[in-house]
């Protein structure tokens, strides 16, 4: 019997995936004057952060947590939203970033390390040492309306971890955050941005609804969302270039807006 020529098999129909949302990646917000004080480029001053939030507003955009952004996308209401993320959970999020987010009507996702509560960023050998939030600090951020996500327990490269360690980092951190905040975290963030197919599959299996990477390449998807690193040097012109670069990358992936 001849094949039905009116209906192509689903497996060979050309499809276009939705473009990844634009998500900005921050770490620490603190005062500094000498670039040598920030060897990894993870710090922006409060003044720079405020200028960047004002730039978003000038373009009709508003920064929100990744969870809020993804819910809005599912409802078709995310056209003017940009994701804001802060990795590692530094104490300066409460004192420097949160007041500015509130001032400009923004929310953010704070990816924290429940296995390193109240210590510092020991994984950065060049420093500077920056204190991390305590359990109470994490609860304060959550109570202020910010989304709390997991960054693992100890900030380890998960691609180099055994299967047992990988499961512990993913599930153990999720369970601890549920105990700390009373809410199961929906999001995960890969330490160092390192991921592979095994790690992505384990993150999905651990129950996370989404995960953030940096430049996940062919692994891009809900559990490997690309992000744009924002630095102290990013004024209006550089932010616009980074926005266009994100849009161009998504077009090259053959996805729809």
Image (spheres, rainbow, N blue to C red):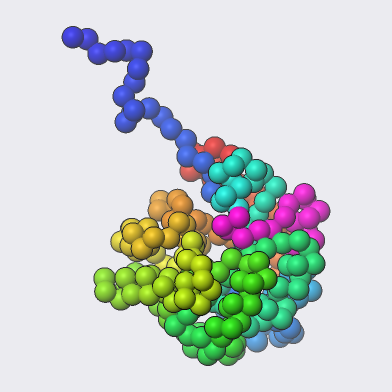
The C terminus - image quarter: top right
Residue at image position (47%, 57%) is 210
- In-image side of 101 versus 257 (left or right): right
Residues 16 and 84: in front is 84
* Residue 21, x across and y down, in percent: 58, 50
* Residue 149, x across and y down, in percent: 52, 68
Residue at image position (47%, 80%) is 114
How many callouts does the rendering have? 0
Residue at image position (36%, 13%) is 6
Task: Residue 136: say if magenta.
Answer: no
Q: Quadrant of residue 207?
A: bottom left
Considering every residue shown, the one lying at the far top of the view is 1
Compared to 19, does 88 lie above or below? below
Compared to 185, does 131 lie above or below? below
Residue 96 seen in render: yes
* Residue 92, x across and y down, in percent: 67, 81
The N terminus - image quarter: top left
Considering every residue shown, the one lying at the far left of the view is 1
Q: Which contiguous range is marked in magenta? A: 52-68
Q: Quadrant of residue 232?
A: bottom right
Residue 21 seen in render: no
* Residue 138, x across and y down, in percent: 58, 78
Residue at image position (53%, 73%) is 181
Q: Quadrant of residue 176?
A: bottom left
């Amino acid at each position: 019997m001849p094949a039905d020529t009116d209906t192509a098999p689903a497996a060979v129909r050309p499809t276009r995936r939705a473009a990844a949302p634009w998500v900005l990646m921050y770490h620490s917000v603190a005062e500094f004057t000498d670039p040598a004080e920030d060897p990894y480029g993870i710090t922006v001053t409060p003044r720079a952060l405020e200028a960047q939030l004002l730039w978003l507003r000038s373009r009709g955009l508003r920064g929100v947590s990744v969870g809020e952004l993804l819910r809005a996308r599912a409802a078709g209401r995310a056209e003017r939203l940009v994701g804001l993320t802060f990795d590692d959970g530094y104490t300066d999020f409460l004192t420097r970033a949160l007041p500015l987010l509130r001032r400009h009507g923004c929310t953010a996702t704070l990816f924290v390390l429940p296995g390193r509560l109240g210590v510092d960023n020991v994984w950065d050998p060049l420093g500077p040492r920056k204190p991390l939030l305590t359990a109470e600090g994490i609860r304060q951020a959550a109570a202020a309306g910010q989304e709390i996500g997991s960054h693992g327990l100890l900030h380890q490269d998960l691609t180099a971890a055994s299967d047992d360690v990988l499961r512990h980092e993913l599930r153990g951190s999720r369970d601890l955050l549920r105990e700390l905040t009373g809410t199961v975290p929906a999001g995960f963030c890969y330490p160092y941005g390192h991921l592979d197919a095994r790690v992505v599959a384990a993150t999905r299996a651990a129950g996370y609804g989404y995960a953030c990477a940096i430049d996940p390449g062919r692994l891009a998807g809900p559990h490997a969302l690309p992000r744009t690193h924002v630095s102290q040097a990013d004024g209006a012109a550089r932010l616009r270039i980074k926005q266009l670069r994100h849009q161009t990358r998504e077009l090259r992936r053959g996805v729809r807006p």
